[in-house]
Image (spheres, rainbow, N blue to C red):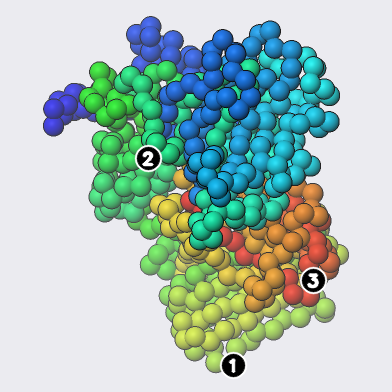
Amino acid sequence: MKYLNRIASVFCAAALGVLALTGCEGGDLYNVDSPDWVSSKVDSIAASKGSGDDVELEGMEEDVYTVGATDFSTGWWAQFSKYYQVPDGEVWNAVFNLGINPAASNTYKNFALIICNDEDRGAADYKEYGAIRYDNQPSGNSEWGDYIDRSCVESTLTFGSDTDAGVEKLGGKVTLTVDRTNPGAFVVRMTNGTVTKTYNQKTALPNLNADGANTNIRCFLVPEGSYISFLQSNIEPIGGFTSAEDKQPISMVLNGVPRKVLQGTELTAAFANVTATVQFEQEVSKTVTAADLTFQAIPDMNSLGTKTLVAVYNKTYKGEGAAQPVIAYASFDIVDKMFTSIGATDNSTGWWGAHSENVKVAPGETFVTNFTNYTSGVSNWNNFVMVLCKADNSEYAVVRADNYGWGAGYDGNANLVTSGGQSDWGAWLAAMDGAKVTTYVTNNGDGTADVKAVMLGTDGNTYIQEYLGINTIDPNDFYFRFTVDGCHLEFDNVLGEEDNTTGWWAAHSELINVPVGKTYTTRFKNYTNGAANWNNFLVVLTNADGSNEYAVLRADNYGWGSAYDACTPSGGQSDWAAWLAAMDDATVTVSVTNHGSSADVKAVMLGSDGNTYTQDYLGLSPIDGGDFYFHFTVEGGHLVFE
């Protein structure tokens, strides 16, 4: 409790200035009248963040040592870094400064990553997968080894020979990533913000360990005519980290702050899974947990509405009391229910008293929506209602849950087919209070539209209502929305834990069948812990029983599976950090098209920053169009379907 008074003073200052500070997530108090050393350090950090390195590093620890002589005299295979053991399913990130000899005339005077099975190079069972050097020379020897495929290499700088000019471009602060998270791939990335080299192998490394149960690989670095000044690693090397002098914190960014907190939740419980990335002096950072932070909600945690979370970190890099604490802010909402709804929860909303927003349906597209229907139970029409309209709300038709409708596209339409008049309306009405409803709205593209509702009643029975062939539709100006009368709707189809702690493959939505020649679309809110690009939605293409997984597609221009290699991905963002931040509370529309032997998947992401991002995977093949489904999964996030 030594620093309690200091923290209390900080909270008082924060409360006085909260109106100006709301929404400044990741800010600190030292931006304006800060000491020169802090301002200088903040500027240097900002400059380094703009270097072009878009890798989001988590869990980094200081690891400070030098490999190679600083006079550039170290020859090949003369000095070695520590060994870093990378388990199956994990990522190793390392940051170091690479010193390049200004007088170097050979492109190979840099460093190589060696991938092996053992930390003892002299052991009888020591084996190497191979080596990947930072320079890229297709006609030379910049990669080698029995398990390295040189065709998997891409680089933004390619040399034609050992004596090409430009080796100095490889120097500076390098981020090295060895990624084993995809069980069917092996990825290495080296970048200094100017030169980026990637090794993207679409098959996993074999297990060369004598103990077949041990699937770890080991990595170490070797310089030649250069030197490596190690800075950070997220994996502790064999032999342990090497720490330098202690460092003061200078800024902090919060991660995983929930957008919504249920009323009555205690402060500590609400933010127990929040972490913070703390930036220290000398460009060193690490991620700390909620246990290392002190929280306060401004103005309180009791009333509904938007609040400001104030988080304080008051330790040095080594855990001592800091000279000055750093503070970060984030906004969140106190809500009385966690889901989006239409209508008053006591079912008192009158006719036309509440509406959802309009949803556009393109020609040839079917839009799928899930919700729970609650009714006062007074009359059959006290349930969900769907309005088909133009962008200006001019109506084509209005259709109810109970086999009744009206409008220009409904009245007098000799081609209209309705089905779903229930055999026992009393039983149906009772079962609709809490019924799980899936609606399908199809724009046929020929001036007609279809509406289908599948209602799983609380009595366990499934009821179906269809309106097929609604006409007078302008296929290029077709929307729908929901309204209510004596009922309310809860769009409560949530996938994943709302604190964004769901792990890989731990939660899946229901399968949606897409017939040949059809495009099915669904929309949801995407929430992410912001830790990495893959902590967002994923689309899984499969057959009905899951025995044939055609492809798994991430939100961030990456995927895998038998149908993935043939596809054309597009949508890699120009600013991944901005995209990742905008994906928390983003509205995402995903469309899946079944062409028979191939499929297309398109995602339109309206970010929380107001910008629209797209991601397409076109020409996914082969698929069995007669047995084609998709569903969603999530990692480190959650989805709320509309």
* Circle nearer the N terminus (1, 3): 1
Marks 1/3 in contact by CB < 8 Å: the verdict is no
Q: Judge whether residue 607 can be spotted in this image.
A: no
Q: Amino acid at mark 3?
A: Gly
Give residue 423's mark: 1
Give residue 275's mark: 2
Q: Amino acid at mark 1?
A: Ser
Going 80% across and 24% down the picture, which residue do you hit?
Answer: 159
Q: Position of residue 379 (x, y in %)?
A: 49, 80
Q: Which dot, 1 or 2, sits closer to the camera?
A: 2
Q: Is residue 147 left or right of residue 530?
A: right
3D distance between C-alphas at marks 1 and 3: 35 Å
For mark 3, give the secondary structure.
Answer: helix
Q: Judge whether residue 343 can be spotted in this image.
A: yes
Q: Which residue is mark 3?
A: 625
Q: Nearer the viewer, residue 50 or 156?
A: 156
Q: Position of residue 455 (x, y in %)?
A: 57, 78
For mark 2, give the secondary structure.
Answer: strand
**Mark 1, residues whose alpha carbon is within 10 Å: few (<14), some, or many (≥20)?**
few
The quadrant of the picture occupied by the C terminus is: bottom right
Which residue is farthest right?
446
